[in-house]
């Protein structure tokens, strides 16, 4: 039966492709769809840049399909098989546990409930909880969520922005990425664009009953596009500070009244300990000023020590109660442990272990571990998993501000320098282990601890990613320019293999600027522009990707680095390929091959030449397929396939076989295409390449329909 492909179906499909998943298979869908668009229209059609553009393209295609039943059937097969169905919302881990010592806040809880249950009447249900640091905004949100689990059977989703490496926290696209991952979407299935991520977020939550909590939001742009469009989704944004202009019910969390503060002290320290300190309570309550965090810290001191004596330094002076708490905790720790905490706070590290803290204070890791345990006991430091720690943001700022007057600027700078050196050593070891054959990462240092294999290196780099990203800006601020550049280059495995494009982008921009200012037209500067071009390309920010990649080409050429120039020209071709500019892409791939062939046997890159040429041939084959030159495409892809088979590179062989199967399908050779698909599946199954295998399954359906 003849199936008519409608304009609406084409528009929906093309829009889904344009906003589709990131990563290799997202690009494969995009490039393959572009090839069919060109074949249908008989001319090159640039990739649309807006919803209007996708709709106009759908209308033009529909007009052609109405006159060509064969092409109509091909599009019908494609629409039935691709792209994959949207991910389903999964409840996930829920919110972090609420505190056992929650006290009062009944008015705030009632306001939250009122906003959550009011008639939607076309208005999104959203609340903005705000209050000064330590007042208990997060505790209120988590407590309310714990009491409302039954109201949200489709899940409670929590994103905490407090430990982000960027100064002002992540942008809206990065916040959407983190939220979608909490909702069960694998990173490689998250769309690369902000518009695509928002659209997926709305599809996942449409008709659902869910609670979304974003903690430590710093500005309205981070959360504006999370306002729900479905009535049973409730967005709760928590700000540690003043309210901002979000279209939501603004709910201030006030300080605890004295009677409630005493209740909280009794819950944490016990009635007996509070009774022993009865004579000191008025002064203690005055210092804490109803601040939940300061009260909890004071209660913990009551548990482990004699009732505290009033200290004139703690008297109210207009400073926050958290400030007084941090001062008291430092006095209780003793000078060495307090020094360690202050120096560890100077860099603003998102997290640290005993080794990094010890580097900051120039003490042995085992001594640092003991001091950190003491700091946890007095609430100055929070423990995380696997022996890592962090400061509360306000405590970290206070400790860092106190470090200069207490220890001197020179000692603070030395502490930062020691931590930077330690992070650089870790990053270089991890990056080399993750990409042992890549010339884009440095060899592993002689000192330090190597990682056993690629998986261990990638795991270590993921764990340390936020610190390394933060370290780039810290190294820049402290004048350690060489360290900043080397750290940024060590991020390459994260963007290449783990899709950390949103995460690494700010650090790469800082490093590229530094390189241009201090080391222009060098291999280092060119390499950083290449990384930026790759990053922007993966995020489909095309103009920025073109600009940075052209800078990489120019820089590598000025430095006389043929391998780098060829690789950058190749990236230009890949950027064009993703935008359906197949002719221009083919020209760049041919140019890249010519540059590679100019590398002499004794020059840098000669050892990688056969593999680079095989990849260039693969890319030429993909571009030729887009141009409709299927015989030439097949020749190049078969040569690339044979090379990777000889080298035993199963993953790259499977990728080329996928390209070849698509070319064979376009040529009407579906039996041969199916044989290639079967071989690709055999190679890729042990690799765990799930998205690729799913793509092959859909390609198989199209080929079987064509037999």
Image: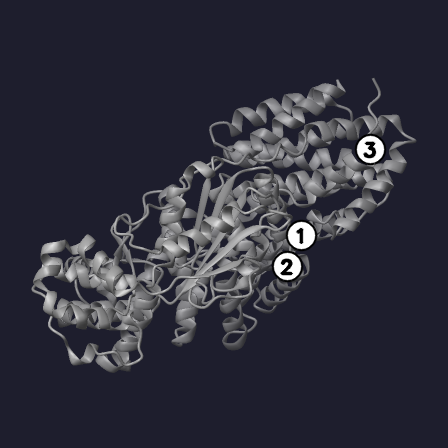
Label 2, secondary structure: give it.
Answer: helix
- Residue indicated by mark 2: 545
Label 1, secondary structure: give it.
Answer: helix
Label 3 vs label 1: CA separation? 30 Å
Residue at screen point 55% across, 34% down:
88
Residue at screen point 26% across, 76% down:
403
Q: Quadrant of the N terminus?
A: top right
Relative to 459, is 240 above or below? Answer: below
> Which quadrant holds residue 8?
top right
Residue at screen point 19% across, 68% down:
329
Q: In the depicted view, which residue is nearer to us: 351 or 696?
A: 351
Q: Residue 96: horizontal and vertical position, in percent? A: 36, 46
**Residue 705 vs residue 186: left or right?**
right
Label 3 vs label 2: CA separation? 34 Å
Tell me the colour scheme of the image: one colour
**Residue 163 vs residue 271: left or right?**
right
- Residue indicated by mark 1: 575
Q: Residues within 10 Å of mark 3 (few under 14, many from 20)?
A: some
Q: In the depicted view, which residue is nearer to us: 338 or 425?
A: 338
Q: Quadrant of the C terminus?
A: top right
Q: Residues within 10 Å of mark 2 (few under 14, many from 20)?
A: many
Q: Residue 398: horizontal and vertical position, in percent? A: 30, 72
Label 1 vs label 2: CA separation? 8 Å
**Do the residues bearing badges 3 and 1 touch, measured as CB atoms within 8 Å?**
no
First in residue order: circle 1 vs circle 2: 2
**Residue 85 vs residue 8: left or right?**
left
- Residue indicated by mark 3: 6
**Residue 338 vs residue 635: left or right?**
left
């Amino acid at each position: 039966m003849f199936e008519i492909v409608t304009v609406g179906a084409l528009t929906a499909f093309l829009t889904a492709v344009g906003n589709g998943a990131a990563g290799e298979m997202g690009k494969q869908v995009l490039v393959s769809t572009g090839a069919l668009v060109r074949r249908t229209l008989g001319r090159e059609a640039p990739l649309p840049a807006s919803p209007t553009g996708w709709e106009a393209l759908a209308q033009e295609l529909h007009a052609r399909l109405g006159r060509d039943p064969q092409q109509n059937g091909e599009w019908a097969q494609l629409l039935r098989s691709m792209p994959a169905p949207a991910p389903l919302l999964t409840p996930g881990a829920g919110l972090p546990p609420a505190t056992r010592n929650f006290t009062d806040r009944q008015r705030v809880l009632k306001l939250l409930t009122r906003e959550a249950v009011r008639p939607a009447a076309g208005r999104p249900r959203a609340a903005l909880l705000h209050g000064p640091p330590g007042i208990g905004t997060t505790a209120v949100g988590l407590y309310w969520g714990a009491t409302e689990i039954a109201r949200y059977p489709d899940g409670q989703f929590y994103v905490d922005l407090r430990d982000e490496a960027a100064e002002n926290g992540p942008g809206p696209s990065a916040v959407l990425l983190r939220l979608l991952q909490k909702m069960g979407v694998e990173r490689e299935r998250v769309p690369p664009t902000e518009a695509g991520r928002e659209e997926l977020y709305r599809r996942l939550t449409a008709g659902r009953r869910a609670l979304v909590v974003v903690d430590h939001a710093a500005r309205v742009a981070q959360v504006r596009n999370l306002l729900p469009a479905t009535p049973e989704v409730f967005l709760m944004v928590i700000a540690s500070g003043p309210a901002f202009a979000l279209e939501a019910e603004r709910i201030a969390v006030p300080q605890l009244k004295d009677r409630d503060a005493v209740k909280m002290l009794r819950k944490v320290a016990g009635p007996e300990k509070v009774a022993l300190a009865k004579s000191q309570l008025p002064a203690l309550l005055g210092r804490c000023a109803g601040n939940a965090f300061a009260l909890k810290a004071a209660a913990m001191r009551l548990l482990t020590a004699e009732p505290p004596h009033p200290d004139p330094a703690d008297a109210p002076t207009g400073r926050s109660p958290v400030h007084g708490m941090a001062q008291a905790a430092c006095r209780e720790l003793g000078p060495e442990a307090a020094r360690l905490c202050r120096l560890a706070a100077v860099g603003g590290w998102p997290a640290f272990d005993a080794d990094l803290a010890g580097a900051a204070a120039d003490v042995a890791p085992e001594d640092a571990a003991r001091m950190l345990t003491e700091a946890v006991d007095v609430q100055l430091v929070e423990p995380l998993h696997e022996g890592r720690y962090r400061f509360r943001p306000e405590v970290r700022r206070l400790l860092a501000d106190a470090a200069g007057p207490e220890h001197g600027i020179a000692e603070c700078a030395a502490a930062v320098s020691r931590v930077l050196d330690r992070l650089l050593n870790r990053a270089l070891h991890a990056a080399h282990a993750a990409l042992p054959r890549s010339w884009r990462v440095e060899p592993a240092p002689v000192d330090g601890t190597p990682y056993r294999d690629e998986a261990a290196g990638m795991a270590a780099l993921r764990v340390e990613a936020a610190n390394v990203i933060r370290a780039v800006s810290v190294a820049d601020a402290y004048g350690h320019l060489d360290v900043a550049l080397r750290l940024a280059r060590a991020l390459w495995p994260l963007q290449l293999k783990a899709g950390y494009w949103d995460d690494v982008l700010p650090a790469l921009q800082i490093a590229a600027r530094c390189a241009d200012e201090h080391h222009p037209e060098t291999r280092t500067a060119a390499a950083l522009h290449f990384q930026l071009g790759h990053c922007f390309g993966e995020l489909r920010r095309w103009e920025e990707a073109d600009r940075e990649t052209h800078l990489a080409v120019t820089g590598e050429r000025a430095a006389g680095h043929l391998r780098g120039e060829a690789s950058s020209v190749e990236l230009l071709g890949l950027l064009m390929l993703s935008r359906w500019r197949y002719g221009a892409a083919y020209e760049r791939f041919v140019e890249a091959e010519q540059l590679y062939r100019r590398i002499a046997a004794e020059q840098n890159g000669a050892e990688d030449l056969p593999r680079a040429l095989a990849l260039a041939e693969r890319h030429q084959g993909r571009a030729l397929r887009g141009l409709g030159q299927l015989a030439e495409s097949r020749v190049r892809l078969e040569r690339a396939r044979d090379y990777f088979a000889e080298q035993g590179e199963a993953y790259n062989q499977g990728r080329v076989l996928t390209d070849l199967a698509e070319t064979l399908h376009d040529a009407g050779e579906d039996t041969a295409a199916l044989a290639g698909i079967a071989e690709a599946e055999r190679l890729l199954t042990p690799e765990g390449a799930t998205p690729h295998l799913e793509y092959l399954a859909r390609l198989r359906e199209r080929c079987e329909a064509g037999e």
